[in-house]
Image (spheres, coloured by chain):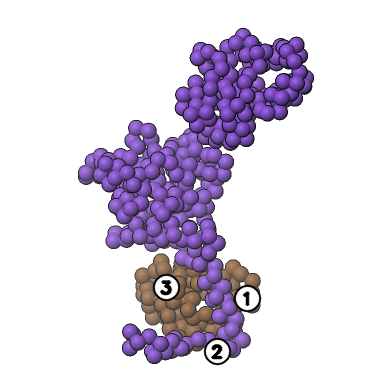
Amino acid sequence: MIVKTLYVTNKLGVHARPAGMIVDITGQTKSDVTIIHDGQKANAKSILNVMMLAIPPGSEVQFEIDGQDEEDVMKQLERLFHDNFHEESY
Amino acid sequence: MSAYSLKDLNVNCRDKYPVKNLWLKHKDLLQLELCTGEDSLNGFIEESGLHRPGLAMAGFTSVYSSHQIQVIGHTEWNYLESLGPEKRRAIFKNLSQFHSPLWVITHDQKPHQELLDMCNDQNAPIFCTPLYTFEFANIVQRILEDFFAPYAVIHASLVDVYGVGMLYIGESNVGKSECVLDLVERGHRLVADDVVHISQIGSSIIGRANPMVKHHMEIRGVGIIDIRSMFGIHAVRKIKKIEVIVELQQWDRHATYDRTGLSSSVEEIMGVKIPHILIPVLPGKNLTVISEVIAMNSLMKMDGMDTASSFNELLLRRIKEKAKGHKVEDFMDESIFNGNAYE
C-alpha cells in the first residue's frame, strides 16, 4: 500500500467536475483507493463519496492506494492535481 | 466507435408530390372540391410552399414560382372580381406562359370562368375549399414539409418512454431488442425495432417503423413476434420525434462514462443535434429502469430542472463556507427524535 498527500490548487476546490476526473482514474483500477480529507475517509471510486468531503482550495488530501497498479494510479492522480484539474489555479 | 450507425447516412429526398395524392389522401382534411375534370390530376408539385400570384396578376411576372401550389385567397379573388372579364382574360393569357401543378381557391369562393378556361387548356386542376387561406396554408405546409423532408434508414430501435422518444443504438447483439421488449412490458410504446425510418423536419428528427415490419420484432431464440397483438394497441406508436439517443455499449473498463451529468454530449443526425447518452451494458444491469430514469431526467431538463448543476452549486457553496472556516453541517444534525420510525 502507498500513501501520499496531494494539494488542491485549483480555485474552486473539488466540485463535481474534478470529482468526476478523480473517479475516472480510480474507477478503472482494480486497486482499492481511499481519499482522506480533514480526518474523514471516503471511497475514491464513488463520486458522491468524493463530493461529500467538500474539499476547499488550498487544502491537503491524502490518497491510500492498495493493489497491483498502485504506483501507476498514484502517478495519474498526482498529474491531475498538479494540473489543477485543468482549471484556474488557486 | 461512438454512434457509428448515425454517421455517413444515405440521405435521400423526394422531389415530386403527385397532385392525385393530395386529392386522394387529404381531400377531407383540406375540404377540397374539384372544379375541373378528374384527368387534370396528373401533375406533380415539385416545390414545398405556396405561391400567391397577386403580383403576377398585377403584371409582375419576372419572378414566379410555377412549381408550387397557386393560391387565390380573399385578396386575389376580390382583385380579379373588381376587374371585369376582359381584363381577367388578359391576365390569365399572360399567366398561361407558366404551367402550375394546381390552383386553389380559398374562402369558399368560386373560380372565375377565365381561370377555368386557362386551367382546362393546360389540363391543370382547380380546387375550392371553405378554409381560410392561413388554415389551408398551415395544413398543406405540414403535408409538403413531411413529404419533401430529407430521409434515411438507420439500424436502431425507437421507443416512447413516458412521452420521450428514445432511440437505441449499438452493435448487434448488445441487447437493444431485449431492452425494448422489457420497456414494452412495463407499459411503454414501441415505435420501431431494428429498422427506423427517420426524416428531418425543421429542427426535429421524426422516426417511423418500416411499413412492412411495423410492430413486429425479432427476439433471438424465439423468432418473430407481433407486439401489437401480444401486448395490445397501447404498446405501439406509429410516429415519434427522437429526443434522446441512448447508445448501448459492451462495458469497457477503460472507457469513461459520464459520472456527473454536467457535460452534455450531443450526437448529430442530419444536422440536428440530439442529446446522447452512453450506457455500458453489464450482465445483471437493469437497462429498463435506467431508460426510465433517462426519460424522466430529460423531462425534468425540458422543464428547466437540472439536478446535476444544482447539486454542484450546492457543493461549491459548501466548499466556500468550509474554506472560510464556517461550521458545516454534521450528519448528527438530523436528530433521532425527528423520526420515530428510525429509533
Dot 2 falls on which chain? B
Q: Is residue B281 left or right of residue B18?
A: left
User: How many labels sit on residues?
Assistant: 3
Res B106 label? none
Residue shown at 75%/11% (left/top)? B86
State the image coordinates of residue B18 (x, y, percent, origin top left): 51, 22
Real-space Cα separation, disc 3 to disc 2, in angstroms: 25 Å
Q: Position of residue A61 (x, y in %)?
A: 51, 82
Q: Chain letter for brown, please.
A: A
Q: Nearer the viewer, residue B183 or B36?
A: B36
Identity, as a three-letter code, of the amino acid under mark 3: Ser
From the viewer's perspective, is residue B219 above or below residue A61? above
**Image position of B92 with respect to A13: above or below:** above
Residue at the spot x=48%, y=29% of the render?
Answer: B28
Considering the numbered disc 3 on the image, is that residue within a helix, a strand or a loop? Answer: loop
Left or right of residue A81, residue B335 in this image: left
Q: Which mark is residue A46?
A: 3
Q: Earlier in the sequence, mark 1 or mark 3?
A: 1
Tags 1 and 3 touching, CB below 8 Å: no
What chain is tagged by disc 1? A
Check disc 2 and report the residue beneath it: B327
Residue B107 location (% of width, % of height): 62, 29
Which amino acid does the dot numbered 1 rest on?
Lys
Packing grade of label 3 (10 A; few <14, some 14-19, many >=20) is some
Q: Which chain carries label 3?
A: A
* Residue labelled with disc 1: A11
Mark 1 vs mark 2, CA separation in Å? 21 Å
Q: How far apart are marks 1 and 3 (CA)?
A: 23 Å
1 and 2 marks in contact (CB < 8 Å): no
Q: Check contact, mark 3 vs mark 2: CB within 8 A.
A: no
Picture coordinates of residue B9 (x, y %)?
48, 38
